[in-house]
Amino acid sequence: MVALDWDFTNVPQQKKRTGAFGLTDANRRFLILALGFLALVRLLLIFWLPVTDSTEARYIEIARKMVVSNDWITPQFDWGVPFWGKPPLHTWLSAIGMKLFGINPFGARILIFAATVLTVTVVFDWTRRKRNTDTALIAVIILSSSLLFFGASAFVMTDMTMVLGTTLSMVGFYQCVRSEGGQRVWGHMFFTGLAIGLMAKGPTAAVLTGIPIFLWLLTGRRWRMLRRLPWVTGVLLLAVLTAPWYAAAEFKTPGFLRYFIVGEHIERFLVPGWDGDLYGSGHSRPKGIIWLYWAGVFFPWSIFAAVLTLRASKVRKVFSRDGSGWYAYLAFWAISPLILFAPAANILPAYVLPGIPAAAILLTSLWREVWPGGGKVARFVVGATLGAMLTLYSGGAIICGISPGRLTTKSERSLVERASDLDPEMTLTYWGGRSYSAEFYSRGTVKATASPKVLRKMKTNNRRDAIAVSSQSVPEVLAIVGPRFHDMGAFGRRHLIVESPRDGDNS
């Protein structure tokens, strides 16, 4: 492992240091290789990690239905049941990927990963413009190796597409109001990012962008800078990119806007245990826990952020002498999800993600200012931490490639494949409720029931059946279906109960 060398004082000439961080050529090569290694491991996980219940599998199955139905306006939670919970940008990306590469996990995930790569590229380019290449390289390494950003980078859900939108908006706004030339390009980038956010997750994206911008303008008395935005053409661009779908969705399925705006964006966050969710249940959590989530999402670099508090006086000096407002802008951006979701009762750790790009840039920039020398211990700890994360992720990928069931049991891939191997014509039914990953891997052929009457009919329906059952329900189900059905063992979280071949069946 090459330890990151942050000390750029009293350096022998042969180390060939350049830039604010004084990184050696060996340091840069290590960082570039680490970034490439992270991308490679995440690509392998796209292939090797099974589609898991319930979040990712639900969204992938919705995208599969979009491909099959060719309905690109209304995502479908089930056939004929519209999915009003989120706008369709991430669904479009997954569906387009499956159109291009087939209905498989790679096709579903690859364009989500592409959106993440674009986010990282924007962060690198902006940090390089405002600071230098070394700072930009370290910032994107911290961003890409943080725990949940790495995990979510190719996960089929709304958050990473929204992170792309909020990142574009925040970078575009700052550059527009601070740059001497080319303001209109950056201003239109701001409005494009808003459009992406609105199509990824809705008004939440606009609020997450508005909070840090408002606080930055307020604390620095910078209100006049708003005049630099291309309001007329920008708002027109925003409307063109978003209004057609919202109008079409409401026209096609009336009631969408009321549920989506009021239910998903007000009641979900303010009502503990909100029971108005049409597609699941609320995630009731103690209010304020979002701050603890941040530490986990940004791990291990949240530890380094905590260490900076040991030099709080120097941090305050950095902020006080920052005439451009760079540090304040990053700080408000980083904590905007924490401000928004602190009073919320129904939240998930992924809600922190829109602020993580700013946290990575802020941590890197502040560390350079507050600890310019670093010291041998700090250099070793940073290098060792990055090496540990690379080892953790690559180890997880290897385990997933060899035995995916050891990494997660929340996938029905092995059970569906086993049932198909036994008899491709056999009808597979899930007892107790739907499994989205089973629907995806079976291409929508599995059924679900909670009715004993349906199970009893299997004894006389003149076809071979199989039942997926939780371990605690095996005795109950076997008692209902009778001696023709046999437990084939556990496959992940469920047992596969299979009917013996009927007379004349050579299976």
Image (spheres, rainbow, N blue to C red):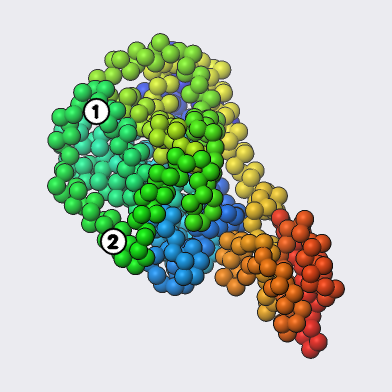
Residue closest to the eye, 305 or 158: 158
For the point 44% across and 16% down, the residue is 371
Image position, residue 196 (x, y; %) = 33, 50
For the point 36% across and 60% down, the residue is 255
For the point 34% across and 56% down, the residue is 257
Q: Which secondary structure, mark 1?
A: helix
Image position, residue 356 (x, y; %) = 43, 35
Residue 293 is marked as none
For the point 35% across and 63% down, the residue is 254
174 left or right of 290? Answer: left
Position above or below: 423 against 246:
below
Q: Residue furthest top?
A: 313
Real-space CA distance between mark 2 and mark 1, rounded to the nearest whole angstrom: 33 Å
Is the C terminus in the top left, top right, bottom left or bottom right quadrant? bottom right
Mark 2 or 1, which is nearer the eye? 2
Residue that carries the numbered disc 2 in the rendered image: 247
Query: What amino acid is labelled 1 in the image?
Result: Leu
